[in-house]
Image (spheres, grey):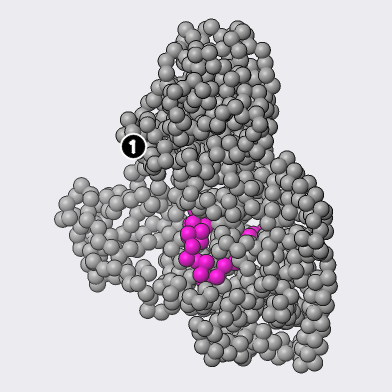
Amino acid sequence: MASSCLTKTKHNIIISIFKSISISKSKSSFTNRTSTSTNSLSSPVPKYAAYSKTNRTIGFNRCYEQAYFSRRLHSTVSVSNDVAQLVVEPPSQQFLDFPGGKVNFTRKLMFTSNSTAERVHCYRVLDDNGQPFNDSESLKISKELAVKMYTNMVTLEVMDTVFYESQRQGRISFYATTTGEEAINIASAAALNNNDFVFPQYREPGVLLWRGFTLQEFANQLFGNKFEYGKGRQMPIHYGSRKHSYFTVASTVATQIPHAVGAAYSLKMEKQDSCVITYFGDGGTSTADFHAAMNFAAVTEVPVIFFCRNNGWAISTPVHEQFRSDGVVVKGKAYGVPSIRIDGNDALAIYNAVHEARKMAIKEQTPVLIEALTYRAGHHTTSDDSTRYRSIDEIEKWRGDQSPIKRFRKWIENEGWWNDVAESEYRSSIRKQVAQAIQVAERIEKPPVADMFNDVYDVPPRNLNEQEVFVRKTVTKHRRDYPSDVPL
Amino acid sequence: MSHCIASPLQTPVAGDRKIVTFGSNMLGIVRQSVNGARSLSSQGFGDYMMRLRPVASAMRRYSSATKEMTVRDALNSALDEEMAADPNVFVMGEEVGEYQGAYKITKGLLDKYGPERVLDTPITEAGFAGIGVGAAYHGLRPVIEFMTFNFSMQAIDHVINSAAKSNYMSAGQINVPIVFRGPNGPAAGVGAQHSQCYGAWYGSVPGLKVLVPYSSEDARGLLKAAIRDPDPVVFLENELLYGESFPVSAEALDSSFCLPIGKAKIEREGKDVTITAFSKMVGYALKAAEILEKDGINAEVINLRSIRPLDRATINASVRKTNRLVTVEEGFPQHGIGAEICASVVEDSFGYLDAPVERIAGADVPTPYAANLERMAFPQIEDIVRAAKRACYRSAVPLAATA
């Protein structure tokens, strides 16, 4: 960045650039708090000085290519090409101290382009054949961890298939698969601590799975029976579990993003060694909530990881119709949030990125944005038939060798930790377990009538108590008119 | 902080320089009533609470035991005490910190508690409401200020879908001890987009509690109760009441003082007609009651204090005593608070009604700006008097629908 503003061949003003800028109203000379630094996409996270009410410092280096009319007392004559003459001018008169920091001027009338020549690069560890590159930056993963990650991914895939089929059979009303995003689900969860609070969208049940949610617990929620933690109040796939630090899924898109920032603010006030992570899709980044949350997180400096699953589709809206920016990663820069783009089908890349992001978020108390490029290989939900708006070839391609499970499997088999026999045994075992869980869940009673009236408030108000008594009386009196599997 | 007696109804906020005065020479008897209990009147004219005109000579007539406090100071002191008592309580909103609050309700809190607990936010109601809800999910107790509740419409998804319904939808795993507060309803000359009353909107949502304080005692007691409550509370204040002074008892000044949520207060007892009101309209109803007294109509004035839960028991008991009902509100008439009260009374006390219920509400128009038009768009004391007379069959004029 520095080069374009500072070349002597152009008749630009050459001014030494100061990193920290005071936004107080004083017109005193600059403070030299830190040394200069460049600001580019590949630079490390800029260090933010500690918050100070009167002297908030901004660790940025900006070089805007805009035309400004000089508002200084000097006429434009003083804006000279002669460096030597400028050097003798007192520093405080060399450029204006706008609110928000000092800015270099330029005399070129030039707009930033609506697109960059090259898109932001994507971090990956394993190649298409599941082999690590020679110079991949990656942590070493133990066999236990790798096998656990892989088996969880397989469980997620099998669970999705069987539950999806059960919806098609009419046994549950609704389901949404995570097909193609198993690595995102499992590898990101693996890189977190179990008590890092998770604010999911709805395509992240794998995080719960990793943390120990059982197949039976999943099935109970889908069938809305009396053992499910939601007391039968929500649609299928709206899992939630306080003990797993996994906030209940809500259908409202992207509302979880500002919630995550608020929870991270609470963590920051408690000074805990944990962070918050929130997941959302490419479609969710269009919402006002995404914008407000990112902005807020940057301003309040809270330990939150924004994990965007850019899977190419928001139901039938492809990303080209969702935004015209270079994906989501560049939006982090706009808000002042350190960001990275990663290969969302590469489990090791995800693991490394989340691991590092977590460290950064907690140590530096900063938000971090991760954009994971992946593909939604399944339909949006059971209410969708995606072949209506995209080609079957495209879907098949991403279910093929690009599938995160296949790529990771190649890697662990290459390490000697897995083989075909283990694969088929594991898959059939899981399939049986899921089918068993469904059968059990189906037969369990539905939640009792009392669960319709409690939890509206902390203490049930009198009108609800009265209504409950009334409902019980009515149901008892007219038993035939009510479903037989609702216990009173 | 000092309990200063501000000049009546000054609203020192950016963009709004109006000074509005109510009536004149309104002196009255102090009512020592706390927690809904009735106390004896000190002069035998019947118990009623009246706003005092802040004139020095008037002040000396009252016993030295009672202090005067503006609603603004009442809210400020309640916030201060709750923040001191519980480190999880924090305040968030636009201009609440450095600017000392758009209406100075949060004055002094930034200096006392620091920027972590008094957060100046960017301009995004949706943002900071969502963030407040997230903080509440995680165990903090945020007090979110909307500069007016008109702006809460930007954040209404978070108030309703993220706050009100969360305890239910998570089956009790996540509760939201959050308070959304700010001025509600019309002020003086602020136009259509700044004058709407949201009592009916929020009052219809299960999972929320909706409070509407009138006096300083109401403000203190209800705000403290709201902050301590584990459920989300919408706290509807009134800009014009901020500068009004009310006497407060020693008990109300205590830092553990708290009013119960869901209990209305009978501000003035009567036997001929029940007038229900909330917020600023309580003051109007009390003045109307005085005028009616001269015509021999003894009105009972109920200060609702709580829209959700609505104190149907008190309202119905009163109607069963007086047999006539007039409901007063500033909001739009259709689907309003008066409609709900009327339905409740018809359901529970139909046989006791001797006259149709009179509903006084704001005009069914976006609020006009011009002072004369604005005055016609909201209930005035005369409207309440006329309605009460109609309910008592003292008027030859047939029923009118609204103000």
Could you say where residue B56 lies in the image, as x and y percent from the top left? 46, 10
Query: Given the image, on which type of amino acid does mark 1 rest?
Result: Tyr
Task: Say whether residue B277 is magenta.
Answer: no
Could you say where residue A44 lies in the image, as x and y percent from the top left? 51, 67
Q: Residue furthest bottom?
A: A420
Could you say where residue B259 lies in the image, as x and y percent from the top left? 66, 29
Q: Quarter holding the C terminus of chain A?
A: bottom right
Horizontally, residue A218 falls left or right of residue B194, namely right
Q: Find numbered disc 1 in the image and state the secondary structure of the residue it sits on.
A: loop
Residue hosting label 1: B369
Image quadrant in which you'd find residue A239 = bottom right
Q: On what subunit does the disc labeled 1 rest?
A: B
User: Residue placed at 73% from the left, 50% from the top?
Assistant: A453
User: Residue placed at 24% from the left, 70% from the top?
Assistant: A10
Horizontally, residue A327 falls left or right of residue A396, namely left
Q: Is residue B395 above or below residue B104?
A: above
Q: Which residues are magenta?
A: A274-303
Is residue B217 visible in the rendered image? The answer is no
Q: Quarter holding the N terminus of chain A?
A: bottom left
In this rendered view, identify the residue nearer to me: B313 or B82: B313
Is residue B382 visible in the rendered image? The answer is yes
In this rendered view, identify the residue nearer to me: B261 or B323: B323
Horizontally, residue A103 falls left or right of residue B400, namely left
Could you say where residue B293 lies in the image, as x and y percent from the top left? 52, 14
Q: Is residue A51 above or below residue A376?
A: above
User: Residue placed at 68% from the left, 89% from the top?
Assistant: A410
User: Residue placed at 78% from the left, 46% from the top?
Assistant: A469
Task: Say whether residue A286 is magenta.
Answer: yes
Circle 1 residues within 10 Å: few <14, some 14–19, many ≥20 = some
